[in-house]
């Protein structure tokens, strides 16, 4: 028969050593910190995307509310505010004098610049070209 042992601590392979437990805890801590870092960067990314979407929506609102139809669009600057977002629409001649001597051109290109500034200070700027009816001379 086998000799009886009085306690399990007499065996060398009875459990984990203190060093093994500390190494395992260190590995778990490193993994938790890495997961936390990834989560924090995801939260920042989601907030940035949310701010961009809000700014884009404000830009669309400004373009729909502030910009008159092509027939009514005139040179100059107009501005306003929608839900804390400030918008400005500038209509200026594109590239200088587009008049062609002895021509019958009914339309001239105009640069339309729409800027929207969020309450946090972030701005969005869209530029486009619109053909506008030439002023009667």
Image: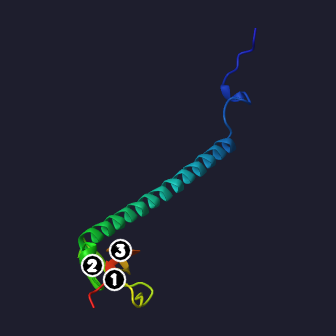
Q: Compared to 4, does 119 lie above or below?
A: below
On-image quarter of the C terminus: bottom left
Instruction: Read off the residue under disc 1.
Output: 91
Instruction: Read off the residue under disc 3.
Output: 120
- Circle 2 residues within 10 Å: few <14, some 14–19, many ≥20: some
Residue 45 in percent (x, y) is at: 46, 60
Distance from Cα at disc 1 to Cα at disc 3: 26 Å
Residue for point 41% across, 91% down: 101
Give the farthest residue toward the top: 1
N-term mark: 2 or 1: 2
Distance from Cα at disc 2 to Cα at disc 3: 30 Å
- 136 relative position to 6: left or right: left
Depth-wise, is mark 2 or mark 3 nearer the camera? 2
Q: Nearer the viewer, residue 15 or 64?
A: 64
**Mark 2 in CB contact with mark 1 (< 8 angstroms):** yes
Residue 39 in percent (x, y) is at: 49, 53
Q: Is mark 3 on a helix, strand or loop?
A: loop
């Amino acid at each position: 028969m086998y000799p009886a042992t009085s306690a399990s601590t007499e065996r060398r392979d009875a459990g984990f050593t203190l060093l093994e437990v500390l190494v395992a805890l260190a590995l778990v801590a490193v993994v938790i910190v890495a997961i936390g870092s990834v989560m924090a960067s995801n939260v920042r990314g989601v907030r940035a995307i949310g701010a961009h979407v809000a700014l884009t929506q404000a830009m669309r609102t400004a373009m729909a509310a502030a910009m008159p139809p092509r027939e009514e669009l005139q040179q100059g600057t107009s501005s306003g505010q929608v839900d804390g977002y400030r918008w400005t629409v500038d209509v200026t001649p594109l590239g200088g004098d587009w008049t062609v001597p002895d021509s019958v051109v009914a339309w001239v290109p105009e640069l339309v610049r729409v800027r929207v500034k969020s309450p946090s200070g972030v701005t969005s700027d869209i530029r486009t070209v619109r053909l506008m009816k030439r002023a009667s001379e």
